[in-house]
Image (tube, rainbow, N blue to C red):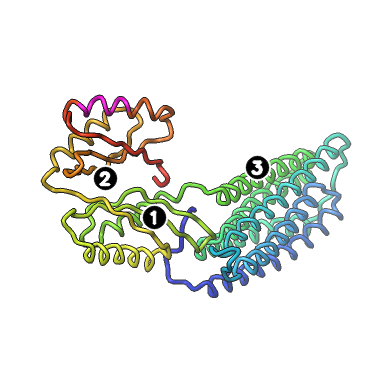
Amino acid sequence: MKHPKTEQTSAAARARRIVRTSFVGIAANVLLAAFKAAVGLVAGSVSVVMDAVNNLTDALGSILTLVGVKLARRAPDAKHPFGYGRIEYFSAVSIAALVLTAGAGSLVESVKKIVHPAVPEYGMLSLVVVAVAVVAKLLLGRYVSAQGRACNSDALVASGADASFDAILSASTLVGALLVKFAGLNLDGWIGAGISLFILKAGAGMLMESVGNIMGSRPDAEVSKRIRETVEGVPGVIGAYDLVLHNYGPDTAIGSVHVEIDGSLDAAAIHRLTRAVQLAVLDKFHVFLTVGIYAVDPARRADSDAVEAAAKRHPGVKAVHGVFFDEERGTLSFDVLVDFTVRDRDALRAAILAELQGRFPNRSIAINFDTDYSD
């Protein structure tokens, strides 16, 4: 999950915004495609025609976004209790596939043009149309990207980025046309090939990001930080750890967090505190958290600090928390957060135990290793 919703925007309002933006994208891209195709066919320019084809794929992408939003809004049911929000990511994958297909087709045609060159003929009207297209795609890209970020839609953000790329590509086409008209230099096939490679690169990036969301990518570091700060801002919370977020769509997420609290609190006080944590995060981020408890004994702070210092001396250890001295059982337990460079956790555990056993010889020590799910 990259960024759960952080403002009180209803699902219906979000859907309307995506639909409205998608219709604007469809209309703009169809018009641009028509004008570019006409110019390319008249001038005999493969780069302009391929640019027009790319605009059509953008329009198809907007249609897929509309379909994805419609399907994703289906209510949760017994078969899919977390809802259908992830369908939006599949629509983004489909858009990426269209972009890759267009890029591959464009590359084939451009190579043919390089092997068998034909000099295109550009009129001033053709040049004006291409120049207007550059400005139009730049404005469209900024508009769609801004709307996508505002309503947390990966598909719209991808479409907006693609439109911005198109503005650069159209500018390249315009440069090729000017070279033909005023310098007699025919680079049409080469420019078309460059455009094709650019399209393929953009499509690959879009595909990787969308697949990453489906697989479960790391949450946005800034959002994770803000959620932890919100949890730690609840009165009675000493520290927040082990934040895990599961993404079930752009505006649906659940997760869990552990909080350190005073070990002397009774069950009723703990209940009030955990409920306050849940409501604070749900209200601000629309994320439901299950809250686990770490009991802290202020009287053992020096021993807890010694445990933390001993563990942190070992490479790969990022943090230590949940240090608990159970006097009834004579045990010491704590969690160690390690980064992904640590391959042999058993060896690390043995090294930490060897160091601590001398300081706490009469304690049974248990170490739990945490995975760095959120930065």
As drawn, 68 above or below 170:
below
205 falls in the magenta region? no
Report the disc number at residue 256: 1
Task: Give the image location of residue 123, x and y in percent.
Answer: 81, 55
Q: Secondary structure at mark 3?
A: helix
Of the image marks 2 and 3, the number of the one nearer the N terminus: 3
Q: Is residue 292 left or right of residue 374?
A: left
The secondary structure that dominates the magenta segment is helix
Residue 42 in the image, given as x and y percentages of width and height: 86, 55
Highlighted magenta segment, given as a residue range: 350-357
Q: Which residue is mark 3?
A: 201
Q: Which three-letter amino acid code belongs to the residue tagged 1?
A: Ser
**Residue at 62% of width from left, 60% of height from top?**
87
**Which quadrant of the view contains residue 191?**
top right
Quarter the C terminus occupies: top left
Taking the spot 68% from the left edge, 66% from the top edge, the residue there is 67
State the residue at coordinates (59%, 69%).
73
Residue 182 coordinates in the image, percent (x, y)? 76, 45
Residue pictured at 44% horizontal, 28% vertical: 343
